[in-house]
Image: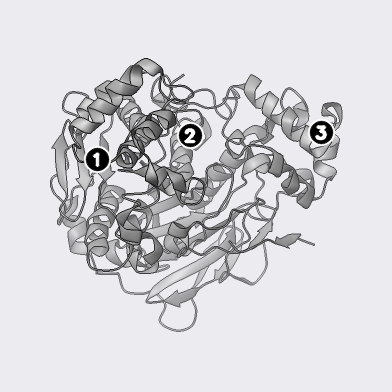
Amino acid sequence: MKRRTLIGAAGAATVSAMSGKVAAKSQSNGPPIASTLYGKVRGETVDDIHIFKGIPYGASTAGANRFAPPKPPTPWAGVRDAQTFAPMAPQQLRINPTLLASWTFQKEISEDCLAINIWTPAVRDGVKRPVMVWLHGGGYYGLSGARNVFDGKRLCKKGDVVVVTLNHRLNAFGFLYLADIAPALADGANAGMQDLVAALRWVRDNIAAFGGDPDNVTIFGQSGGGGKVSTLMAMPSAAGLFHRAIVQSGSYARKAHLEAVKPAEATENARAYLAALGIEPALAGQKLRELPMEALVAGLKTVNRTTWMPVADGRVLPSGPWWPEGPSISANIPLMIGSTETELTAFADTSDPTAFALDEAALRKRLSPFLSPADIEPVIKTFRASRPNATPTDLFFEIMTAIPFRLGVWRQADAKAAQNAAPVYVYELDWRTPVDGGKWGSPHSLDTPMVFDNVAMSASMVGNGPEPQQVADQMSSAWLAFARTGNPNTAGVPIWPAYTTKDRTIMVFNVTSKAVKGFRDDERKALSDLKAKGFFD
């Protein structure tokens, strides 16, 4: 019997021509049915879009399958209902902060979580549509692909594409490095990433039955999802399974997103987790598969969430993924990459509300853990020069967004451009949400409802009024164009040149968007040579 646990609530012309026009539905009566290699599935139709939820792409990961590479699902007879999302991967959830209150998620967790969700304009109609595979955020620790803001109906209708979301193993269940402790479980280090490869193989082998083109697959993700995209670009097992990539607020200039954890550090992290579980390392291979799922989840309480991330194990992930250079294995994959203007305000939502009322002394004190004493004043001076009316709080969020996020974007964009094999397009979302009097600026995750064109279900994040939709119209159109052709240029969006290390052109999305050459170049130069603690080594 499956164990499930309830936890607390918490070309541009082509795209322009296709916008709003969906190919004729292949089924006019009854719910849609599609065939996979493992059996038939029955979905539902909502607003003329066929939706399939919870289709297994892998077997349960419990018992003997725990900390092992994913295995294929068991075939089924008859027609399987696919109208309900699968449970989330095992995890501990945090209460939704204010900004994300509009975004729902299911409350169930299970080790039987490897499942795909599909939104498509038609099934079995012979049309090959671009496929957009979304990798959810939450670091490598939590959440799932089933939040309402990831609903693919509007993207399907607008661009005649197939949208896919999915769940995969997370935290210790997906990233526990045991090669030096329990060699038989060595593949657990990157099991969560291997799940993503298995999902992409499922897409390759089955998506044509859902109206998609297996030879035109875009992987895109935000935050931790962006890090997963970057990691997949360095994995030999993922080569050929996708053809374009988009990293949203996931180019964090530290380990996990540009640089994976080294085995020695990962081994220490594993020992700390085993200690939390009360397991002697010599018995890890046996005990870890015997303990109930709930015990493994409880053990996560004492381990930092950032512990869980891909490991450069020399097997699944040979090195990198993006440090010290871009992965050659994906050099020919077009890349889109960017961030929001004030990412860090979202992290102060519930964890640090005092950050919104800083004076000059408090600004310097808060920067001291990240910048050397000699660097603090020059950095403040540089950022204040282009923001003469900025408050200390404004400067704090701008600087602390630039250090981990924008510097990561610049570094990854430079590495991609240096390959000179496929274009990289860089953006920044500068539209500011009016929620709570505008205190949040352009927070982390603000791009998600824009890209999915789902601002109507994101009032807690974007507020009301016409502006969010005006921004979403541009961003979703650019994402659809990129998915179709590898070029984001399309009607309704200013001309967006590819990024080069010579002119560093960045698309600045706002109600009125613009492409700016050398955007924030003074800040980039001021930060590039810093020896900031914990971010640049």
Element at badge 3? helix
Element class at badge 1: loop
The answer to which of marks 2 and 1 sits earlier in the sequence is 2
Going from N to C along the chain, the mark reached first, 2 or 3, is 2
Front-most of residues 24 and 100: 100
**Alpha carbon distance from label 3 to label 1:** 55 Å
Q: Is residue 489 above or below residue 23?
A: above
The quadrant where residue 465 appears? bottom left
Q: Which residue is mark 1?
A: 390
Given residues 64 and 93, the one toward you in this image is 93
Amino acid type assigned to the residue bearing label 1 in the image: Ala
Residue labelled with disc 3: 285
Q: Nearer the viewer, residue 519 or 44?
A: 519
Q: Which amino acid type is shown beneath numbered disc 3?
A: Gly
- Kindly report the distance in space between the C-alpha atoms of the residues bearing marks 2 and 3: 27 Å
Residue sitting at x 34%, y 19% = 375
- Res. 80 image quadrant: bottom right
Residue type, label 2 = Thr
* Element under disc 2: helix
Left or right of 156? Residue 317 is: right
Res. 376 in view: yes
- Along the line of sight, which residue is nearer the eye, 129 or 518? 518
Does residue 418 appear anywhere in the picture? Answer: no
Q: State which mark lies toward you, 2 or 1.
A: 1
Q: Which mark is residue 231?
A: 2
Tell me whether the residue at label 3 lies in contact with that at label 1, contact meaning CB atoms closer than 8 angstroms.
Answer: no
Q: Residue at x 44, y 34 (%)?
A: 233
Quadrant in which the N terminus is drawn: bottom right
- Which numbered disc flags the more N-terminal residue, 3 or 1? 3
Q: Residues within 10 Å of mark 1 (few under 14, many from 20)?
A: some
Q: Quadrant of residue 157?
A: bottom left
Examine the rendered structure and indicate whether residue 106 appears above or below residue 169.
below
